[in-house]
């Protein structure tokens, strides 16, 4: 790889991936706290929308997520939980509607056709913007390199002893975008029901505005993934032996060989695996999903220190990543087809990662949510 191309790819990687009114039934916080948690959860006066209000119809392709009080973050028996997932914090979240699947290629294509929207990966790279995110004095790469493109995955031919060096399996690929997720020679033809990828945070927001939706908060995403099960590591329980039947992840030695025990080597069509108890598909594996929260590695610790339950939290007030202080990252959730037991294991409910808002990758997509109030607008 040309040195300048390698630098640009690595710079973007650092910015991207360091750390891969009808009557409504209501209840108080005390109504949804388990007996074990009751003594630990700070009391707060708030009522939570649990059930979908009578007369409110779920939008096509969306399901109702019941509101609840729960502990967001790593559960006590998760031995591989990372520091930025703990300690678990007490949150109260109102009910809402969520897409049953990740936004698909067909859905995103309809948006682009209706609006003429051009994604970030399809635009030329703005060096003035990029240089704000790299060390001062960095030399500008040649204009031939600053062309529309994105990051694509490449398998390694041999074992990789250092799994912290992401540049070993990510390439900066000119011509990669949502229509060509693996590079200019690739295509989404015949893949309408696959999750759209190579979409940045900005792209996801644009889709949401068009569809009268929004991105979920991290708390909403975890509530939806748990689907009423608040003490388990995975959204199906604690048994990791059934992973291949429940999610699209990487089996075998990462990033050398994927045995495809789950049926797929890379992305899978939506609804390829059983849904969780709420009817939500791919809340583990397949592709990472954008949330609206800033990624701040200290969020859980700082929140826990305040000793108060949060009501419909929207995450940290500002981004912070000690290894990448120049980046402004948002939380992504759910893991992807690249997650393996040896590398990230982010198919766990509490797993999280930060991704730069202007970055897109072939394993990152999104799904949307809608509140009852939004549907009445």
Image: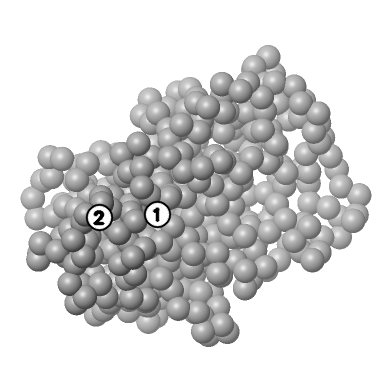
| Vertical relation: 370 (above or below) 237 | below
Which x, y percent locates residue 259?
Answer: 22, 53
Q: Observer-nearest residue: 310 or 127?
A: 127
Question: Residue shown at 85%/43% (left/top)?
Answer: 25
Query: Which label was assigned to residue 11?
Result: 2
Q: Observer-nearest residue: 268 or 370?
A: 370
Question: Which image quadrant is residue 365 in?
Answer: bottom left
* Residue ID for mark 1: 356
Q: Secondary structure at mark 1?
A: strand
| Vertical relation: 49 (above or below) 69 | below
Image quadrant holding the N terminus, namely: bottom left
The crowd level at tag 1 (other Cα within 10 Å; few <14, some 14-19, many 20+) is: many
Question: Residue shown at 61%/44% (left/top)?
Answer: 314
| Vertical relation: 202 (above or below) 113 | above
Question: Which image quadrant is residue 46 in?
Answer: top right
Which x, y percent locates residue 125?
Answer: 32, 71
């Amino acid at each position: 790889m040309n040195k300048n191309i390698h630098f640009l790819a690595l710079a973007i990687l650092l910015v991207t991936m360091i750390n891969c009114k009808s009557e409504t039934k209501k209840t108080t916080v005390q109504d949804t706290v388990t007996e074990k948690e009751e003594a630990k959860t700070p009391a707060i006066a708030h009522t939570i929308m649990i059930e979908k209000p009578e007369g409110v119809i779920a939008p096509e392709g969306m399901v109702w997520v019941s509101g609840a009080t729960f502990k967001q973050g790593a559960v006590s028996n998760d031995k591989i939980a990372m520091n930025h997932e703990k300690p678990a914090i007490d949150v109260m979240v109102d009910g809402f509607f969520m897409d049953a699947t990740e936004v698909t290629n067909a859905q995103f294509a309809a948006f682009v056709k209706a609006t003429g929207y051009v994604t970030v990966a399809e635009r030329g790279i703005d060096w003035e913007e990029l240089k704000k995110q790299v060390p001062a004095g960095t030399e500008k790469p040649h204009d031939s390199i600053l062309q529309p493109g994105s990051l694509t995955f490449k398998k390694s031919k041999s074992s990789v002893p250092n799994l912290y060096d992401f540049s070993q399996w990510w390439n900066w690929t000119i011509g990669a975008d949502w229509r060509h997720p693996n590079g200019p020679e690739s295509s989404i033809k015949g893949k309408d029901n696959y999750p759209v990828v190579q979409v940045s945070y900005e792209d996801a927001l644009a889709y949401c505005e068009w569809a009268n939706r929004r991105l979920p908060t991290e708390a909403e995403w975890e509530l939806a993934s748990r689907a009423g099960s608040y003490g388990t590591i995975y959204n199906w329980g604690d048994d990791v032996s059934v992973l291949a039947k429940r999610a699209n992840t990487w089996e075998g030695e990462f990033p050398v060989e994927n045995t495809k025990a789950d049926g797929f080597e890379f992305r899978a069509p939506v609804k390829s695996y059983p849904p969780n108890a709420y009817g939500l598909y791919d809340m583990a594996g397949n592709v990472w999903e954008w949330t609206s929260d800033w990624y701040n590695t200290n969020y859980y610790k700082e929140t826990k220190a305040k000793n108060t339950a949060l009501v419909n939290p929207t995450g940290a007030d500002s981004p912070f990543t000690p290894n990448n202080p120049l980046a402004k990252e948002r939380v992504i959730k759910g893991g992807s087809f690249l997650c393996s037991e040896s590398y990230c294991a982010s198919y766990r409910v509490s797993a999280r990662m930060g991704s730069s808002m202007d970055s897109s990758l072939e394993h990152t997509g999104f799904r949307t949510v809608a509140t009852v109030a939004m549907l009445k607008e």
